[in-house]
Amino acid sequence: MGNEILRLETLCKDYGVGDARLSILKSIEFSMEEGELVGIIGASGSGKTTLLNILGCLDRPTSGRYILGGEDVSAMDDDALSRVRNRSIGFVFQSFNLIAQLSVMENVEVPMFYGGVSRSKRRGKCAELLDAVGMSHRLGHYPTQLSGGERQRVAIARALVTDPVLVLADEPTGNLDSKSGEDVLRLFDDLHESGRSIIMVTHNPEIADALPRVVEMRDGALQAKPSQLTGGVPR
């Protein structure tokens, strides 16, 4: 670690117009170093989803800056943001977001397909990642034929297939039983140990307690110890 992977500078997000404007994110200052695993906790309505949408380049801040991998993505147009999403960010969702009509292999291929990667290269990379998450025996199966834990493993492989700068995991164990959830968390631990940069949103205090660094969203602001608002795992 030591290289900054992202920075939020006085980041704000408002909705509405005039007197009807609602401030969702309020002057957020945050940075994260390469290889960190950071948890975000917070009550419903605290701004977590809005923050995650901005981190994932699905939305833009009203003001402030978002620096990702050395690029200021705050004011990029839609096409540029789409390229950043595909190239630099891997998403893991609570509801898996797999395409029912596609096989396991085809689901993992999707980001590379939109990135213009040849079929042979896609297949090789996807097979390698599916083996790494323990799903090499399910390549031709469809999401409806998989357990929740297996679906999430496929989703994690898909998130990694473009070798992203940042992995965003939104309640990745929320739809899993305790055993499958533990397996998925161990997989995230392995990814962290391998040097992946991960932000994980969770409502589960037990999961949060086990993470090396945690920040809390409260009323649109990040609340944490001062040492946790800048990059680096606290000692």
Image: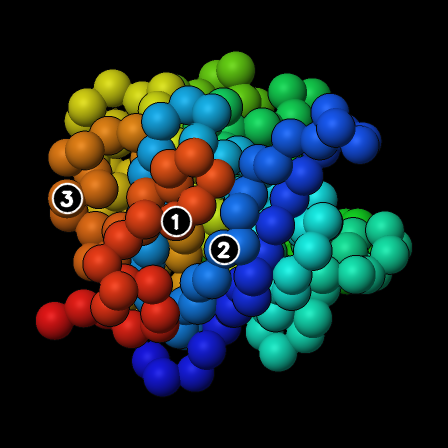
Q: Quadrant of the N terminus?
A: bottom left
Q: Position of residue 171 (x, y in %)?
A: 39, 32
Whichever of callouts 2 and 1 sits on the residue coming sooner in the sequence is 2
Q: Is residue 98 left or right of residue 92?
A: right
Residue under circle 2? Answer: 28
Under mark 3, the amino acid is: Asp
Left or right placement of residue 151 versus residue 18 in this view:
left
Query: Which is closer to the viewer, label 1 or label 3?
Result: 1
The answer to whether marks 2 and 1 mark residues whose Cβ atoms lie closer than 8 Å is yes
The amino acid sitting under disc 2 is Ile
Q: Position of residue 72 (x, y in %)?
A: 69, 71
Q: CA distance from mark 2 to mark 1?
A: 7 Å
Name the residue type under label 1. Answer: Leu
Looking at the image, which residue is at 48% across and 39% down? 220
Q: From what the image shows, is residue 1 above or below residue 180? A: below
Which residue is the extreme one toward the top?
144
The picture places residue 57, in percent across and down from the top left corner, at 68, 51
- Of marks 2 and 3, which one's residue comes earlier in the chain? 2
Up/down of 176 relative to 187, above or below:
above
Mark number for residue 117? none
**Residue designated by label 1:** 222
First of labels 1, 3 by sequence position: 3
Residue on which disc 3 sits: 209
Figure quadrant of the C terminus: bottom left
